[in-house]
Image (cartoon, rainbow, N blue to C red):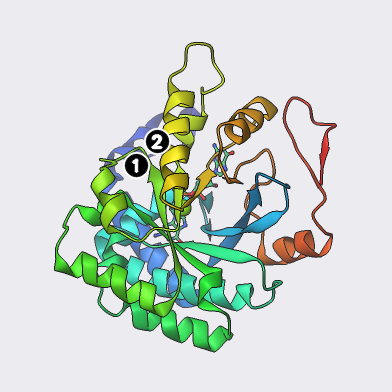
């Protein structure tokens, strides 16, 4: 066993034994505990109208304060949740929690919830959503489901039927991370999306000289507009990026320039304090209305 003396020289021993597979198994066990003990939280990142800089709504984002590792990014634990099927329980809880929080906000404010491909393949999803909406007593059009292109990977009648069922429930649909996957225009033709979310990899670097990102963003926003869809530019961090994506026709903006994800209490407070927000970034003194 690893000896304690000698400036921790032997500690590599325990690291060796702690393989990636073990770490994953531990994470799975911890995740089960978190689900049963209420250790997961939803945080809400404001989504801003480009035209008047008021709050259009929020995107619900999972947060996990792990007992020993501290705050874990969803990028770290969502894959584990997907591989183990735990995403079904987590996803159902997230939909219910988001609807309950939505009920405490003004009626013109929306909330988006991310839906994993595994949830999308579950025929019970429309029922889960219908029940959550009924429990919270909210208008279904205030709930927006964010779906990535990966749901089209096993494209079959089930996919079409799910889109139709969700439309009947009355929720809005957004295509998340657009541009990072196959980005087939066929998806836009067959699936009834209300919004395209332009992935932050296109926003990042778009202001650099010679970047092609601006041309890509322009073509996405004009396509979306022609199809009657909204667009959100994701991951807008600087004033230059903000000015660029507004000038390229994005209808909604999301990013640290306005706000990171907030606790439900802080999100409500942000709504109650009105639409006044101060942007961070290079020209941080600039205030927005
Ligand atoms: P996403 O749906 O594309 O969410 C946007 C991500 O970008 C969030 O990361 C958000 O915090 C981050 N972000 C927003 N503005 C900025 C910015 O200005 N700069 C930078 N660098 N990042 C920004 P987060 O919260 O770590 O979530 C990562 C991913 O995890 C999400 O990507 C989504 O795919 C997944 N996820 C989060 N919550 C859920 C959930 O409840 N269910 C499912 N199935 N997936 C979720
Ligand atoms: Mg999303
Ligand atoms: Mg995204
Ligand atoms: Mg993403």
How packed is label 1: few (under 14 Cα within 10 Å), some, or many (20 or more)?
few
Looking at the rendered structure, the secondary structure element under dot 1 is: helix
Q: Is residue 282 above or below residue 33?
A: above
Query: x and y percent of residue 131 in the render?
Result: 44, 86
Q: Is residue 154 visible?
A: yes
For label 1, the residue is: 14
Residue drawn at 60 percent across, 65 percent down: 110
Q: CA distance from mark 2 to mark 1?
A: 6 Å
Looking at the rendered structure, the secondary structure element under dot 2 is: helix
Disc ID at residue 11: 2
Tell me if 124 is positioned left or right of 237 in this view. left
Question: Disc 2 vs disc 1: Cβ atoms closer than 8 Å?
Answer: yes
Q: Is residue 216 above or below residue 48?
A: above
Which residue sits furthest front? 226
Tell me if 216 is positioned left or right of 39 in this view. left
Query: x and y percent of residue 249 in the render?
Result: 56, 37
CB of mark 1 near ligand 1 (< 8 Å): no
Which one is in front, 259 or 27?
A: 259
Query: x and y percent of residue 11 in the render?
Result: 40, 36
């Amino acid at each position: 066993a690893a000896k304690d003396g000698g400036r921790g020289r032997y500690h590599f021993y325990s690291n060796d034994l702690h393989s990636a597979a073990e770490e994953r198994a531990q994470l799975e066990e911890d995740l089960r505990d978190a689900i049963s003990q209420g250790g997961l939280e939803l945080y809400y990142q404001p989504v801003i109208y480009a035209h008047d800089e008021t709050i259009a709504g929020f995107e619900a984002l999972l947060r996990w304060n792990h007992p020993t590792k501290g705050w874990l990014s969803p990028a770290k634990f969502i894959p584990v949740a997907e591989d183990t099927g735990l995403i079904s329980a987590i996803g159902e809880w997230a939909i219910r929690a988001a609807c309950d929080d939505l009920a405490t906000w003004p009626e013109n404010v929306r909330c988006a919830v991310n839906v994993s491909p595994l949830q999308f393949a579950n025929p019970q999803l429309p029922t889960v959503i219908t029940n959550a909406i009924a429990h919270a007593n909210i208008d279904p059009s205030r709930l927006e489901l964010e779906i990535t292109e990966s749901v089209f990977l096993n494209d079959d009648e089930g996919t079409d039927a799910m889109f139709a069922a969700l439309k009947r429930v009355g929720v809005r649909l957004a295509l998340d991370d657009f541009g990072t996957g196959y980005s087939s225009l066929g998806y836009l033709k067959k699936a009834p999306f209300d919004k395209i979310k332009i992935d932050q990899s296109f926003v990042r670097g778009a202001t650099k000289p010679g970047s092609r990102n601006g041309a890509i963003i322009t073509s996405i926003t004009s396509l979306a507009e022609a199809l009657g869809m909204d667009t959100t530019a994701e991951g807008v961090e600087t004033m230059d990026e903000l000015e660029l994506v507004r000038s390229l026709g994005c209808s909604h903006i999301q990013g640290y320039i306005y706000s990171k994800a907030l606790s439900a209490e802080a999100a409500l407070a942000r709504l109650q304090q009105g639409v006044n927000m101060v942007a961070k970034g290079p020209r941080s003194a600039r205030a927005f209305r």
